[in-house]
Amino acid sequence: MRWKEAIAFTEKLSGLAREFTEPDGRLVVTPEKLGAVIARSGDLATQLLERTTGLSREAIDHLRPVEVLDLLAAAIEVNLHEDLLGKARGVGQALSRSLGLAAKAPGDA
């Protein structure tokens, strides 16, 4: 996926934030959770497959479920791997620090 496509995908995914919220209120995003949420959302799954494989929605609709799930697993691996998520977390943390929203380390005043 290209940047523009990734942003559009992320905007749709952000609407599902409750799926990543732990009982204590923390937001936890892992490749496993992402995969599960995307797989349950037909529109997100199809969009990810279209952008990653170049297949049309119609072509994807004609695949067998096992083929779609195999492609989806590969698309998640390519586009949403842990290294990429780590970089996204780093950007979020840098933004929090720059806005003064980051929690202070113990002992800091």
Image (spheres, rainbow, N blue to C red):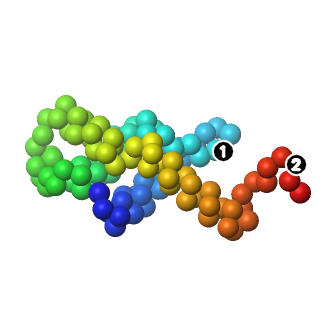
Q: Residue 25, which numbered label?
A: 1
Q: In which quarter of the image is the N terminus?
A: bottom left
Q: Where is residue 34 in the image (x, y as percent from the top left)?
A: 42, 42
> Which SS class for mark 1?
loop
Can residue 39 be seen in the rendering of this structure?
Answer: yes
Is 54 placed left or right of 75 in the picture? Answer: left
Above or below, 97 against 81 in this view is: below
Please give left or right for residue 46 compared with residue 88 in the image: left
62 relative to 97 in the view: left or right: left
- Whether 103 is drawn above or below 71: the answer is below
Q: Judge depth for marks 2 and 1 and give the one in front.
A: 2
Mark sitting earlier along the chain (2/1): 1
Q: Is residue 41 visible?
A: no
* Amino acid type, label 1: Gly
Using the rendered view, name the quadrant where residue 100 is placed.
bottom right
Rendered residue at 66%/61% (across/down): 96
Q: Nearer the viewer, residue 80 or 38?
A: 80
Circle 2/circle 1 CB separation < 8 Å? no
Using the image, tell me which numbered label, if any, was put on residue 107: 2
Secondary element under disc 2, as helix, strand or loop, is loop
Residue at 88% across, 48% down: 107
| Direction from residue 14 to residue 27 in the image, left or right | right
Inter-mark Cα distance, 2 to 1: 24 Å
Residue 27, position as x, y percentages in the image: 59, 46
